[in-house]
Image: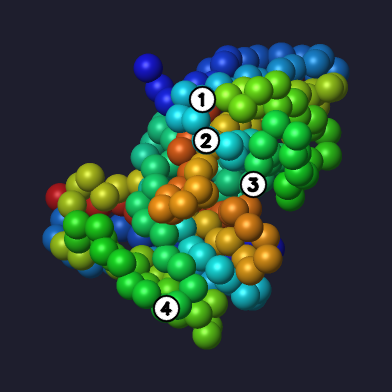
Amino acid sequence: DADVTQTPRNRITKTGKRIMLECSQTKGHDRMYWYRQDPGLGLRLIYYSFDVKDINKGEISDGYSVSRQAQAKFSLSLESAIPNQTALYFCATSDFSRGNTGELFFGEGSRLTVL
Amino acid sequence: QQPVQSPQAVILREGEDAVINCSSSKALYSVHWYRQKHGEAPVFLMILLKGGEQKGHDKISASFNEKKQQSSLYLTASQLSYSGTYFCGTEMTGTASKLTFGTGTRLQVTL
């Protein structure tokens, strides 16, 4: 099983619908991130969390919200989806504790299409 | 602020070398390099910390010029398996563990 699991892997929805993307990890990392990938734009940070009580906005948080339900779970919500939120979404985790490099471990991605 | 990567794309024959550059206008604490193959998630290659060190990973190495806020990824004697999109992720001084990624460099290695 993957260390960082995202659900759903693919989702097609309509404008105005509420969508939740879920991420769970078995790596025991404190830090979790949501990135969005669009062709030609690279990976852009939406939200990040350093622990359950610490949530921070990234570069492009407008239109998104997150919930850190537990150390291992970090969900991304689109309250009212719009077509320009069509993208590939990645969850990632990292560990900056002593001796670790802080590399990001990515989930397999959730492809969202908003019609 | 998003780092600038160059070139945007490069095509190599197997065995040739390539250099991918990443530059930032802000003071950097670290630079990460990742490779993403088509349809897959990005995978970590290496991290370079402030101090101008150079690192290697098989025939892939990287350097970090702290004064210029630039990092370069060197791919030596490229193999077909090197094909993919390479991203640098920069961590600015004072923004602990928040990576900002460049737009990527698409590398294709052919026979």
Disc 4 residue type (three-letter) = Gly
Q: Is residue B63 above or below residue A99?
A: below
Query: How dense is the environment of label 1, judged by Cα within 10 Å: few (below 14), some, or many (20 and up)?
Result: many
Query: How dense is the environment of label 2, judged by Cα within 10 Å: few (below 14), some, or many (20 and up)?
Result: some
Q: Are marks 1 and 4 in contact (CB under 8 Å)?
A: no
Q: Report the front residue among A4 and A63.
A: A4
Q: Which mark is residue B52?
A: 4
Mark 4 vs mark 2: in front: 2
Where disc 4 sits, the SS reads loop
Q: Are marks 1 and 2 on the same chain?
A: yes
- Residue B68 visible in the current orientation: yes
Residue at the image point whose x is 71% and y is 14% from the top: A13
Question: What residue did someone put label 2 on?
Answer: A29
Where disc 1 sits, the SS reads strand
Chain letter of mark 2 equals A
Q: CA distance from mark 1 to mark 2?
A: 8 Å
Q: Are marks 1 and 3 on the same chain?
A: yes
Q: Which mark is residue B9?
A: none
Q: CA distance from mark 1 to mark 3?
A: 21 Å
Chain letter of mark 1 equals A
Q: Are marks 2 and 3 in contact (CB under 8 Å)?
A: no
Q: Is residue A28 above or below residue A43?
A: above
Disc 3 residue type (three-letter) = Arg
Question: What residue did someone put label 1 on?
Answer: A25
Q: CA distance from mark 4 to mark 3?
A: 26 Å
Where disc 3 sits, the SS reads strand
**Quadrant into which the N terminus of chain B falls:** bottom right
Q: Residue A84's image quarter?
A: top right
Q: Are marks 1 and 2 in contact (CB under 8 Å)?
A: yes
Query: How dense is the environment of label 3, judged by Cα within 10 Å: few (below 14), some, or many (20 and up)?
Result: many
